Amino acid sequence: MQFSDRRNFLKTASAATLGALAGGAPRSLFANDEVEKIKPTADRCIVLWMGGGMAHTETFDPKRYTPYENGLDPNKVLSTFPAINTAVDHIKLSEGLENIAKVMDRATLIRTVQAADLGFILHSRHQYNWHTGYVPPQTVAAPHLGAWISRTLGPLNPAVPAFINIGQRFDLGEGEELKAFTTSGFLGSEYGPFNVAFPEQAADAVRPPAGMSEGRFADRNAAYKKLLEASPIGQHGSGYQKESLLRAMDNAHRLLSSPAAKAFDLALEPLANTRKYYPAFQPGTRFDTPRDRFGAKYEEGMIGRFGLGCLLARRLCEVGARFIEVTTEYIPFLNWDTHENGHSRLVSMKRMIDAPIAQLVRDLEERGLLDRTLIVLASEFSRDMMVEGKPDNAVKNQVEVPDVINDPKHYGMHRHFTAAGSVLMFGGGLKRGHVHGVTADERPCKAVKDPVSISDLHATIYRALGIAPNHGYEVEKRPFYVTNDGKGKAVRGLFVNG
């Protein structure tokens, strides 16, 4: 079934979520001796999400550079930035990623990830596919990648949420669509995300509301639990789902009284470290609250917010978080969603991500955590100036490109491109200074060697964490796996030990 509008997608996703609440306990599909035993090379995973469509030829797979001038033929423009050298002789990146270039000797770069063919391109549907491995609509609420990892591996620290989502708001454009996949699905509430929209306010999420004493907060929590326990099955979902919600409440309350809660308080981080993640940060002489210190002092908005998200991710890794996603935030027509002004927008986006990502890699390495932490930088698809979708599977254009470029707003990659995209990975037992796959040097810059599907990318991530691609459960009398139909195949050549 094809969807051409957000409303139909949202209706179907909402129905699946309600179905998940009504469903019973998922049952394992296989006995322990029937599932492939995989020795994990990573204990935790950090996804750095470039929501909106990050152009590969403008970031991690630069092509021929064409500077702007009036009268440009758009067909000749492949990259609007020159290539730069990196710490690895055979790897080039795009200008504006100089800090990441310095840590590419710790990286594995996949240049040939192909997004699924979903017809008319909707960001929410492709993001759903990337985060769950499944194509919406589904009759079963598909769990997020982080929920699968949380359920399968459990927490590294019982006091710390196993799945933490940083930087995404759900009260703006397409927020409901994003909620459709930022969920534990049928697995149960206790495996769902702990959402922190603003990292500078993360400490507020692990303390009682302002003006409420800890005693009163504990009493209110106990009263709500009693109310939930006394409610009839069905009012709050199945018995399994109700018990999972109660456990989720216990987990949240445990965090409030744990020393690990201090990891959420960025005000405890030395200022020198803060500046490494947010180079433009210029604090005043007095900070009355953490929000004063970080929120009100922003001069460049989202640039600092993503950096602080990466800093928060590092602090959470240190106290035992299992899966963390940090996003540049998906907002329609903003950030990586470049429907015009593609070049100038990417200047800002690179400033947003370059220093924080490089610093995250260095900090984890210095603390002895990088080898057992898998970092994955990805986006739902790439972009091109001329091609919408794939060259051999054309879909309706959503951006008008003039025959001749005479306005800088048309200089950049504005159409959605699904035939190739870059994924950058660090740590987790992967090779260092390694590139996988080749894309064409002339348009269309599609994968021409060693393409990687979303399902196979997921299998690779799960393999690093010791999870078999056909691990799954029976739900509503149907099998459901961590990779689509259990058929994902890990790209073994990315691993140090194959």
Image (tube, helix red, strand yellow):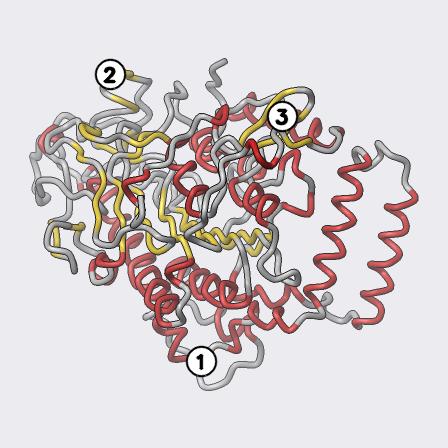
Q: Which residue is mark 2?
A: 392
Earlier sequence position, callout 1 versus callout 3: 3
Q: Amino acid at mark 1?
A: Pro
Identify the residue at image location x=92%, y=44%. Answer: 230
Q: Position of residue 461 (x, y in %)?
A: 42, 43
Are the residues tagged 3 and 2 within 8 Å (C-beta)?
A: no
- Does residue 253 lie above or below 398 as drawn? below
Q: Is residue 96 rendered to the left or right of residue 296? A: left
Q: Is residue 391 rendered to the left or right of residue 90? A: right
Are the residues tagged 1 and 3 within 8 Å (C-beta)?
A: no
Earlier sequence position, callout 2 versus callout 1: 1
Tag in front: 1 or 3:
3
Earlier sequence position, callout 3 versus callout 2: 3
Separation of disc 2 and disc 1 at Cα? 52 Å
Q: Residues within 10 Å of mark 3 (few under 14, many from 20)?
A: many
Residue projecting furthest to the bottom: 285
- Does residue 259 lie above or below 355 as drawn? below
- Which quadrant, please, contains the C terminus? top left
The numbered disc on residue 270 is 1
Residue 128 seen? yes
Between 356 and 351, the one nearer to me in the picture: 356
Q: Which residue is mark 3?
A: 140
Separation of disc 1 and disc 3 at Cα? 45 Å
Q: Position of residue 172 (x, y in %)?
A: 54, 43
Q: Position of residue 50 (x, y in %)?
A: 38, 46
Q: Amino acid at mark 2?
A: Asp
Total of numbered circles in the picture?
3
Tag in front: 3 or 2:
3
Q: Position of residue 356 (x, y in %)?
A: 35, 63
Q: Secondary structure at mark 2?
A: loop
